[in-house]
Amino acid sequence: MIALYEKGDRRVAVVEEARRWQEAGIITAEQAARVAERYRPELVRVNVFIRILLALFTTVGVAALVALPAVIFDVREAGFTLLCLLFAPLGAWVADKKLIAGRRLYRCGAEEALLLQAVGMLALAVAIPAHDWGHSAERLAWLTAHVIVLAGAVVLTVRYGYALAAFGAMLALAALPFHLADILHWQQPPLSRFVLLLLLGAAAIWAQLRLASRTSLPRGYVWSLETVRLAAWAGIYLDVNLFAHRLLWREWLGWIPGEWQLPWSDPLCALLTAILPVAALAMGIGRRDRALLWFGVVSAILSIITLKYYIHFGYLAEELTAAGLLLAALAFSLLRWLRAGSKRCRGAFTAEPLLEPRLYGLNAEALAAIQPLTPAVRVPEARGFQPGGGTFGGGGASGGY
């Protein structure tokens, strides 16, 4: 990641963690304000709504700038290719040099839209000229454009830490087996599914291994890795789920249900559809990972709905009602069991909400920022015996001996 974003990520994360500590009552509002003043980011930040508006405005503006000369000069494929080749590096240079380095923008939407459009225009510049080169050359050119989109999204993720670019890279990676199947004339859809599972599985394992050292990574990288991991999990789940297993594959590849189907594929997909949400929930609880917990909850709900196509117990409404009542009873029983334990907890689990223990691994840095602002406790100095400080009285007492 560029040094400007890495430093900005670190400062922003320290300020946000100090705010969380203030909300939890660990530090005072004055301490949090002084930390925010000391670690004020040097970059320009906007809220998410302004970011979306700037991204949309930039996208429409760049599209208009490209379309205007195309309409005026009535350009065709070659002319449009030339315009894309001109605007792609120009947009990337404006975003990197003028907006980020010059204006010091920090994920404001405009520079992100420019960089993403630069990658898209570069891919179009490769694919559009092949329209008149023949069917085989056109298919190869679109495959090359697909690879350019994948490589460009990876470069944007590595250089800037954009989670949106990481999500785009995962979409391009997931679509690659289908594109290869179309180019290489793979006649059996299970081969494409197997390649897809290998790619998504490798991406999920790599992201999980990288997240093990998240304390040393900038926050933008952490977001990107979490995006890659969740996208891979979601892709694997959709691939083994019955809806993706039959309806989507039939629509995309013309595969009739039951055609080229192994006898054990339905039970295996049903088993994986049930195992994946349980595995995500178990990993989320064990690693205290909120993203995996949310994925496990959402995928479990989807599994309850779609398992009906594998295993039939009755009508869908009856199965959903029974499953909802069962889950509600399970949650209520777990809460009662936890609250009945010693100090309202059992082992490391409790029914009470706790402060999240891991906030991007910056606890030590935030403590170092807050510690000089905390008033020191004064301890009275120990004094030894000092003679001459008092007198012995005893006229009447000594006369009695």
Image (cartoon, grey):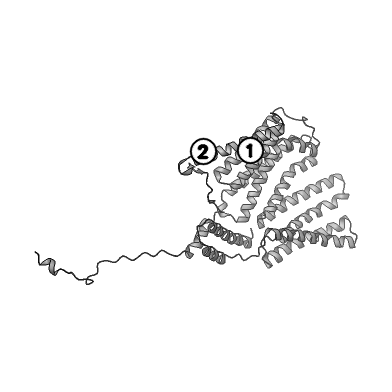
Report x, y in % for residue 211.
Answer: 59, 49
Say left or right for 30 vs 295: left
Mark closer to the chain start, 1 or 2: 1
Nearer mark to the viewer, of 1 and 2: 2
> At 76% across and 41% down in the image, what residue appears?
178
Circle 2 sits in a helix, a strand or a loop, which is it? helix
Hey, what amino acid is under mark 2?
Answer: Trp
Report x, y in % for residue 349.
Answer: 51, 43
Image quarter (top left, top right, bottom left or bottom right) of the N terminus: bottom right
- Nearest the eye: 50 or 211: 50
Q: Is residue 269 visible?
A: no
Q: Is residue 17 visible?
A: yes
Report x, y in % for residue 400.
Answer: 9, 65
Report x, y in % for residue 50.
Answer: 71, 61
Say left or right for 349 vs 276: left
Image quarter (top left, top right, bottom left or bottom right) of the C terminus: bottom left
Residue with the mark numbered 1:
276
Hey, what amino acid is under mark 1?
Answer: Leu
Identify whether 32 is placed above or below 187.
below
Residue 381: which quarter of the image?
Answer: bottom left
Residue 5: which quarter of the image?
Answer: bottom right
Within 10 Å of the Cα at label 1, are there few (<14), some (14-19), or many (20+) other Cα atoms? many
Residue with the mark numbered 2:
337
Circle 1 sits in a helix, a strand or a loop, which is it? helix
Q: How many labels were placed on the picture?
A: 2
> At 63% across and 35% down in the image, what residue appears?
325
- Nearest the eye: 306 or 344: 344
Given the current orientation, which residue lies at the most extreme right position? 74
